Image (tube, helix red, strand yellow):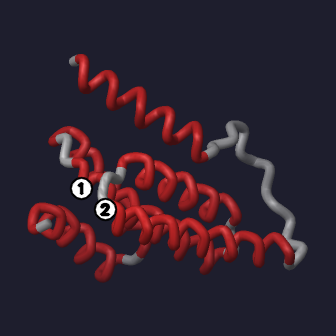
């Protein structure tokens, strides 16, 4: 767990100092490093944290796309998680984000259709599974 804290500490500090956009960049860099180190626990935490950042961005900007990104990140984290308690927390975040998204959609706000490729949680999870297979078989 100390490894996870060390990896998140730098990104958290930048996020507090420079805002959400910089925090997201820091977390993404940490995620890439973590994936290279094949540290599952840290990877799940970073996916969960990136989901949290996207929920906050979606909430502040009333952006449906950010909520969908958060849902995909939470789903990817849950697929990769092997601790039951941690998985329950991710599931709670997923349902909370769905409720926020439903509230935003029910306000009659039009959803942008600028996105040419729809990203679903299943597609994100499949990409991570392909990556796992690639890393496992070298």
Q: Is residue 61 left or right of residue 3?
A: right
- Counting every numbered tag in the picture gives 2
Outermost residue on the front side: it is 84
- Above or below: residue 125 compared with residue 30: above
Q: Which numbered disc covers residue 41?
A: 1
Q: Which numbered disc covers residue 45?
A: 2
For the N terminus, which image quadrant?
bottom left
101 or 116: nearer the viewer = 101
> Could you tell me residue 128's position as x and y percent?
41, 36
For the C terminus, which image quadrant?
top left
> Could you tell me residue 106's position as x and y percent?
85, 75
Q: Residue at (63%, 57%) from the top-left corner?
A: 68
122 or 56: nearer the viewer = 122
User: Contact, CB < 8 Å: mark 1 with mark 2?
Assistant: yes
Q: Residues within 10 Å of mark 1 (few under 14, many from 20)?
A: some
Secondary structure under the numbered disc 2 in the rendered image: helix
> Could you tell me residue 9's position as x and y percent?
18, 72
Secondary structure under the numbered disc 1 in the rendered image: helix
Q: Is residue 127 left or right of residue 109?
A: left
Q: Residue at (47%, 33%) from the top-left corner?
A: 127
């Amino acid at each position: 767990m100390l490894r996870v804290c060390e990896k998140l500490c730098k990104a958290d500090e930048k996020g507090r100092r420079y805002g959400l956009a910089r925090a997201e960049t820091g977390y993404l860099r940490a995620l890439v490093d973590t994936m290279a180190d094949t540290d599952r626990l840290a990877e799940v935490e970073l996916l969960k944290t990136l989901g949290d950042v996207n929920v906050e961005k979606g909430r502040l900007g009333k952006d449906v796309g950010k909520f969908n990104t958060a849902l995909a990140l939470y789903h990817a984290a849950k697929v990769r998680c092997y601790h039951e308690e941690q998985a329950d927390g991710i599931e709670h975040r997923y349902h909370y984000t769905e409720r926020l998204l439903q509230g935003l959609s029910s306000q009659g706000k039009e959803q942008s259709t600028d996105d040419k490729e729809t990203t679903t949680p299943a597609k994100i999870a499949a990409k991570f599974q392909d990556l796992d297979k690639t890393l496992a078989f070298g």
